[in-house]
Amino acid sequence: MSDAATTDGSTLPFPTAPSASTAGYTLAESTHQRRVEPQHLPDDAPNILVVLLDDVGFGLSDVVGGEVRTPAFRRVAESGICYNTFHTTSICSPTRAALLTGRNHHRVHSGTIAERAVDWDGYTGVIGKDTATVAEVLGHYGYCTAAFGKWHNSPATQTTAMGPFDRWPTGHGFDYFYGFIAGETSQWEPRLYQNLNPIEPPEREDYHLSEDLADNAISWLRQHRAYAPDRPFFMYWAPGAAHGPHHVAKEWADKYQGAFDDGWDAYRERVFTRQKSTGWIPAEAELTPRADSMQGWADIPEEQRPFQRRLMEVFAGFLEHVDVQIDRILDELDQQGLTDNTMVIYIFGDNGSSAEGQRGSISELLAQNGIPTTVDDQLAALDTLGGLDALGSPKTENMYHAGWAWAGNTPFHHTKLVASHFGGTRNPMAISWPRRIAPDGVIRGQFHHVNDITPTIYEILGITAPERVEGHEQKPLDGTSLAYTFDRPGEPGRKSVQYFENAASRGIYQNGW
């Protein structure tokens, strides 16, 4: 193998720098000088923070015409640029696998969620050694890497104390991990891991997982500044919010008291009007209809409406609460003087809002496990727990009505799990990088996908996707860098084809069609 082939990044790891010392016959005749490892990154390589929310749709954030306050998303949007034609897969594990590898989800064996992994190519749930993650590649280039929050990319059968641990975050290129290894967990009593070690959350009455994840991210940033300030960092911050169960303290839910009293149909109409006025959707757009199988607000009996309203109030408080935690991380970047050269990629959802709560539930697992219950059953049980105030508390595993999920995906049809309609696959995104990206107020409309994030990172760093990593030949990337959109908002899109598929729900985009 030629020297060029081993030093240009096509093969990783890079060769070790030769010794700079000279060994003589005696110590007196020898010289010692510490070797200098070559720099493989540009001198001004940015820090990178990728934020990925869970189960939130296009029409929720106030930035996009929704009615949930999201100060951090607004902060990134106003200091950078926004995208209104950005796409995910229609479910969590595949989206995360595509994001971290730059490849389509089936190419990295993540055609469905980790719990449903089977021994079919494309569905094993194991991201192969032939598709290295962006964290692995950046680590070879000198980045410090950390992941916080939800890791849903290891087969459920391989998340025990017996491993194998090369399928856990630290086996996929992250120097540090703090979070949970599953599709969801309680926000009050989460099952947590620090690297490979199971840990208990802090024993505090006011504990909340989203706050804990922000605390740990801030602590990690401070350690990075103390011990490796000369190395850039890559942080992947992917909380459990706002996946069910919807858990948040009462005061956060109370901030939205009365905000949704007129139901999900009316919410859709209001948000649709604002989306047009702010340019997030075309002025000539038409609002998609409600599916025949979904209840309208008028179909909800009056005695059940307080329950359905409170479920949405809790969800909205939950979503605002997690966004505020992201704002705390952004504050820390400010305080450390890192904001100017940190690229923040904030993806507002890993798929559309989730309709898995069906008709509203105090325990989302009932529906997921096929246990039949009526809304009246839920209300009767809720009375024994203290009434509506129990929603969002440790006493319940609540999930809102599918109608609210549909409303959260305004203006699109359908929800999470549906890959054939944009309600399941289109999510807003904002990118800020003050040193490189000048905000211009123009929303980018080029068609892009979550598998484009890794190629974008490689392009801005001048990295060529490696052909071999740790001895493993690499599969090609499927993503297309969107860095060209940073300075040219009107540039024609460069992504020609993208498919979508989940559990036989499917669609394809090709050259604008």
Image: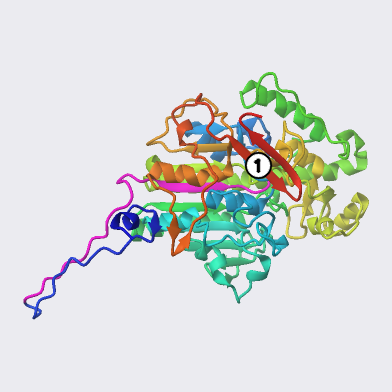
226 or 235, nearer to the observer:
235
Q: Quadrant of the C terminus?
A: top right
Is residue 27 placed above or below 305 in the rendered structure? below
- Dominant SS of magenta comes to loop
| Residue type at tag 1 | Tyr
Q: Is residue 140 magenta?
A: no
386 or 277, nearer to the observer:
277
Q: Which residue is mark 1?
A: 499
Residue 256 at least partly seen: no
Q: Badge 1, how many Cα within 10 Å: few under 14, some, many 20+?
A: some
Q: In which image quadrant can residue 223 be found?
A: bottom left
Is residue 351 placed above or below 483 in the rendered structure? below
Q: Is residue 47 magenta?
A: yes
Q: Residue at x 62, y 27 (%)?
A: 280
Residue bounds of the magenta highlight: 29-56
Q: Quadrant of the N terminus?
A: bottom left
